Amino acid sequence: MTRSLLTSVCALLLASASFADETHAIHQEGAIVSAAKASKAAAFDILAAHAHRDGRLVTFHMTTNGIAGAEQPDPAGALGGAPVLSYVWPTSLDPAAVGFEGGTGILALAATSHPDFDDTPLYDENNDGDPANDGLLWHSHWVVLTLTEACGDGALGVRDIPEGTAPAMPATWPGLPVFIDSPGYTPLFEGPEITVTVPFVSAETVAGAAYDGVTSALRVNKNIHAPLLCVTDVFDVASGDLSLPGAIN
């Protein structure tokens, strides 16, 4: 179950006004466009995903059929079994592009919400003086995804770091035993739109890279053991088949 952060009346009014914004993903040339699906939760029903580059800065954004970010997970009460909701942009970039060990899986940018734990220890998102209580607020991660049979037949998971190994990690890795980075890039929400802008070392790193858009649910293993974090439900895929048809130009 999820809980709405806006009343349905305000949500409808905001959505009506925001869909007209021509900066949104759905209006961009080259966007991956997806048909509305009445069977899906509107906040996670993707209408379009897009990424574009301005020098070494890349803006990833997604237009949904509802109010993006309006739904967040109900807490489980513990780290084991904790639910995660996410907006995700899988890419063709090698994980080494942001500091992970190279050749280790699918590098994806994610905006996530999870009330049971805080994995951004360097940031105090709610500005209350405690950087360890902000997991519910939407925040960004780089993650490396791999096919993880322990998560289910053909399921993806965030790549684990096996005990006794020390693969390369970004400087803002939060210390969890998975391939995850907590860089602090703030997701912005405007009606149906979610936007995250991220820097890269150079423009050449990302020019022409492929991308897709996904909305999904994940869950921490109840045993807090490998695999630590599994994708448990894919709500929508912009391309329909995770073929990464978009190009960052």
Image (cartoon, rainbow, N blue to C red):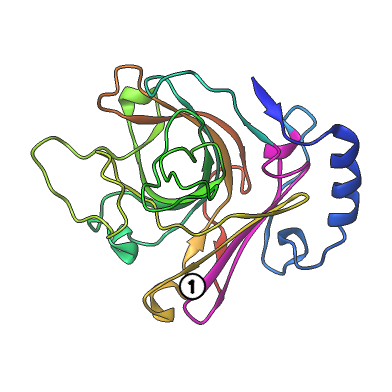
Q: Nearer the viewer, residue 194 or 39?
A: 194
- Secondary structure beneath label 1: loop
Q: Nearer the viewer, residue 227 or 125?
A: 125
Q: What residue sits 12% from the left and 35% below the top?
A: 163
Residue 4 placement: quadrant = top right
Height in image: 31 above or below 143? below
Height in image: 67 above or below 5? below
Residue 192 image position (x, y, % from top left): 76, 49
Q: Nearer the viewer, residue 64 or 75?
A: 75
Count the marks: 1
| Residue reaching furthest to the front | 129
Q: What residue sits 88% from the left and 40% below the top?
A: 10
The stretch of residues the image draws in magenta is 42-70
Rendered-image quadrant of the N terminus? top right
Q: What residue sits 22% from the left and 56% below the top?
A: 101
Rendered-image quadrant of the C terminus? bottom right
Residue 121 image position (x, y, % from top left): 36, 47
Q: Is residue 133 left or right of residue 43?
A: left
| Residue reaching furthest to the left | 164
Q: Does residue 55 belong to the magenta stretch?
A: yes
Q: Does residue 132 belong to the magenta stretch?
A: no
What amino acid is found at the position of numbered circle 1 in the picture?
Gly
Residue 145 image position (x, y, % from top left): 37, 43
Q: Is residue 240 left or right of residue 121?
A: right
* Crowd tier of the residue under label 1, counting other residues whose Cα lies within 10 Å: few below 14, some 14–19, many 20 or above: some
On the image, numbered disc 1 is attached to which residue?
Answer: 208
